[in-house]
């Protein structure tokens, strides 16, 4: 109904065949890119560079944009103490932008995620930066700390001239920094499922988290028969 271009890819994980429609075209990922951040975190865990049990403190400057339930729990000078495992849970299950952005910073920046993708020889995938940087630029703004409370960011965006917002969105869609191909995404997911990207423990942990997501009940889930998992 939206009249937008659509790309689809489906792979048989065991047999290896792939069926695609516009499978090699690049589309914006938006929240799907949290998957590659999580992959980079688990790769760092496997290499002994990060520990899921380690706690970090989230302060007001760790707020992001749009959907970020954790932001409401950052209160007072002590902020919010939370483990990396819980940040992963919020990022993958709830698509919490503040959690995702903090994970990127714990890794050392989006470039580290890009290197992790390259290390695994995954193609057709990109992250582009933190959600707050990508989303503010897409809106025609530059990130400022006061945008942390979501309503302030939305207000600043609404005050921009329409032509500025339209041009910023058109620039993003023409070359999305978080772009990926359907073929690239499904290939990476298949390798993850087969245990080819991470250690057995990290693979199990990540797939378990992904399986706990309960969003989109009337989308892909609605077409699955009883006994299928997503």
Image (tube, helix red, strand yellow):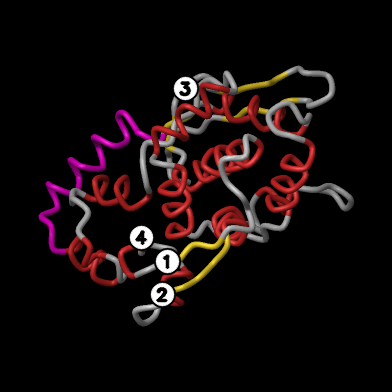
For label 2, the residue is 79
**Badge 4: how crowded within 10 Å, few (<14), some, or many (20+)?**
many
Asked if residue 61 lies left or right of residue 210, the reply is left
165, 30: nearer the viewer: 30
Callout in the foreground (1, 3): 1
For label 1, the residue is 58
Q: Are marks 1 and 2 in contact (CB under 8 Å)?
A: yes
- Earlier residue among tags 1 and 2: 1
* SS type, badge 4: loop
Q: Are marks 2 and 4 in contact (CB under 8 Å)?
A: no
Residues at marks 1 and 2, CA–CA distance in whole angstroms = 6 Å
Residues at marks 4 and 1, CA–CA distance in whole angstroms = 11 Å
**Badge 1: how crowded within 10 Å, few (<14), some, or many (20+)?**
many
Q: Does the magenta segment cover residue 170?
A: yes
* SS type, badge 1: strand
Callout in the foreground (2, 4): 2
Residue 5, picture quadrant: top left
For label 4, the residue is 64
Where residue 150 sits in the image (x, y, percent)? 32, 68
Q: What residue range appears in magenta? A: 159-178
At x 43% / y 36%, what residue is drawn? 127
Where residue 54 sits in the image (x, y, percent)? 58, 58
* SS type, badge 3: loop
At x 30% / y 64%, what residue is drawn? 61
């Amino acid at each position: 109904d939206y009249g937008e271009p659509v790309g689809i890819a489906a792979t048989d994980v065991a047999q290896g065949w792939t069926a695609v429609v516009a499978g090699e075209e690049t589309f914006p990922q938006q929240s799907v890119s949290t998957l590659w951040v999580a992959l980079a975190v688990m790769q760092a865990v496997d290499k002994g560079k990060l520990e899921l049990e380690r706690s970090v403190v989230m302060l007001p400057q760790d707020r992001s944009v749009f959907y970020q339930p954790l932001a409401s729990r950052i209160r007072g000078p002590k902020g919010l103490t939370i483990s990396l495992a819980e940040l992963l849970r919020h990022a993958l299950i709830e698509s919490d932008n503040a959690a995702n952005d903090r994970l990127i910073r714990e890794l050392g920046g989006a470039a580290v995620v890009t290197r992790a993708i390259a290390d695994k020889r995954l193609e057709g995938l990109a992250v582009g930066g933190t959600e707050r940087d990508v989303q503010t630029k897409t809106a025609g703004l530059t990130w400022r700390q006061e945008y942390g409370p979501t309503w302030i960011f939305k207000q600043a965006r609404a005050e921009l001239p329409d032509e500025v917002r339209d041009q910023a969105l058109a620039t993003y869609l023409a070359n999305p920094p978080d772009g990926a191909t359907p073929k690239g995404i499904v290939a990476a997911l298949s390798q993850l499922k087969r245990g080819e990207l991470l250690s057995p423990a990290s693979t199990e942990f990540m797939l378990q988290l992904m399986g706990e997501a309960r969003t989109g009940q009337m989308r892909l889930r609605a077409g699955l028969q009883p006994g299928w998992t997503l």
